[in-house]
Amino acid sequence: MTPEEIKKIRKAVAPSQAAMARALNVPYRTYQDWEAGQRNPSGLLTALLYLLSIRPGLYDLLARRFGQKKKD
């Protein structure tokens, strides 16, 4: 998954990089590195990002699970 694809998914479902990192239960810096192309998400997280791309409502479930507000 490319950094551009990751950023596109986030912009469609999350209000910020920090919110997306919390919803995916990864460190904020790790998520920033994904969008910058400095690191790649693991296989499982790549699959989860793909699921978010086809089922944006999944973000709400993840955000609730980790105590975050959904995107306005």
Image (cartoon, rainbow, N blue to C red):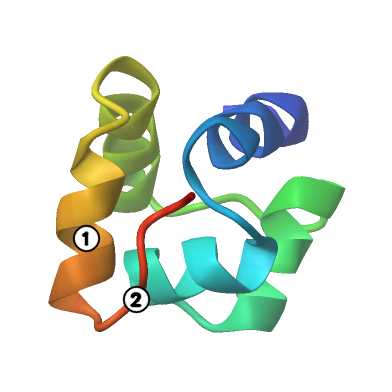
Disc assigned to residue 45:
none
Q: The disc labelled 1 sits on which kind of residue?
A: Leu
* Image point (36%, 70%), residue name: 69
**What count of labels does the image hold?**
2
Residue lying at the far top in this picture: please name it: 54
Q: Where residue 47 sits in the image (x, y, percent)?
A: 28, 35
Q: Residue visible at 32% across and 29% down?
A: 56
Query: Marks 2 and 1: CB-CB under 8 Å?
Result: yes
Element marked by disc 2: loop
Q: Label 2 belongs to which residue? A: 68
Which residue lies at the image location 74% right of the left edge and 65% below the top edge? 32
Q: Residue at 50% of width from left, 61% of height from top?
A: 20
**SS of the residue at dot 1?**
helix
- Residue 49 point in image, percent of width and height: 39, 38
42, above or below 29, in the image? above
Frontmost of labels 2 and 1 is: 2
Estimate the spatial distance between the alpha carbons at disc 2 and disc 1, rounded to whole Å.
8 Å
| Within-10-Å neighbours for mark 2: few <14, some 14–19, many 20+ | some
Q: Which of the pair 32/67 is nearer the observer?
A: 67
Residue 62 circle label: 1
Which amino acid type is marked by label 2? Answer: Gln
Location of residue 42 in the rendering, given as x and y in whole percent from the top left corner: 41, 53
In the drawing, does residue 5 fall left or right of residue 68? right
Q: Going from the N terminus, do you reach mark 2 or mark 1 first?
A: 1
Q: Quadrant of the N terminus?
A: top right
